Image: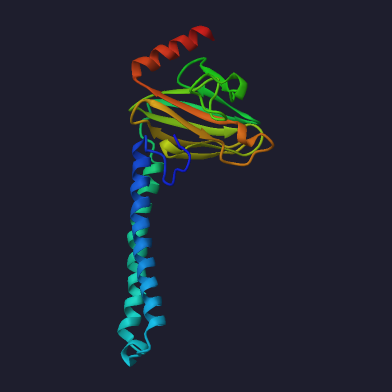
Amino acid sequence: MAHPSQLGFQDAASPVMEELLHFHDHALMIVFLISTLVLYIIVAMVTTTLTDAYILDSQEIEIVWTVLPAIILILIALPSLRILYLMDEINDPHLTIKAIGHQWYWSYEYTDYEDLGFDSYMVPTQDLAPGHFRLLETDHRMVVPMESPVRVLVTAEDVLHSWAVPALGVKMDAVPGRLNQTAFIAARPGVYYGQCSEICGANHSFMPIVVEAVPLHHFEAWSSTMLEDA
């Protein structure tokens, strides 16, 4: 959950998000080192009046400043491609959920069950319970079992939407007439918040996403209750 004045990312709640945070730190360190080197060169060039023919005309230096950036790009590209393929990998999901974007709410269908689905609307400010977050709480949460691969099929009924939960490292566009898929594993129990991340009209800011990860036996009890109420 993000908090005021937060500078970094939210705490990772899935293995993929942990990998993304590590890659972010890796790339940021490279950027920091490059910035420091460039700043040092600028200061040295401005403050000194000495010149050297070896520096002004040197094939060795030209080779270094051509090869070194290529090596740096490789050091950034290889981890990036690895994470890209990890995010695209979906192996034997234990649960499949279809998320459908509407103006301006989400609906969820648990496709492994015969009749388990519901709409998820934002809770108005005047109806919020103590401890709930304004503009982020919904009347029905998407409940998933923790430590289980969950596949999410994302689509939309009307306009473009985007199903995004930062703590889980998930963001997938919802396109009318197209079925996109993504997957995640909730590493620990908790409630994870997200919002539609594609401008979709007047109430774009008012279609939050709430994913609640619970132990498997709690999920089974919840699903049984939902099927009985259907």
The quadrant of the rendering that contains the C terminus is top right
Q: Which residue is drawn at the image coordinates 52% and 30% (left, top)?
A: 209
Q: Residue furthest top?
A: 228
Camera-side residue of 128 and 88: 128
Answer whether residue 155 is visible to the viewer in this image.
yes
Q: Tell whether 26 sits left or right of 154.
A: left
Q: Position of residue 44 (x, y in %)?
A: 36, 79
Q: Residue furthest bottom?
A: 53
The quarter in which the N terminus is drawn is: top left
- In the picture shown, does residue 51 fall above or below 145? below
In percent of width and height, residue 161 lies at 59, 37
- Colour mode of the rendering: rainbow
Q: Is residue 194 above or below residue 9?
A: above
Q: Is residue 58 above or below residue 68?
A: below
Is residue 124 something one can see in this rendering?
no
Return the residue found at the far right: 202
Q: Is residue 139 above or below residue 58?
A: above
Q: How many marks?
A: 0
Identify which residue is drawn at 58% across, 23% down: 123
Q: Nearer the viewer, residue 146 or 117?
A: 146
Please name the residue shown 56% across and 28% down the image: 134
Nearer to the camera, 99 or 27: 27
Residue lying farthest to the front in this orientation = 47
The percent coordinates of residue 163 (x first, y second) are 53, 36
Nearest the viewer among 148 and 212 is 212
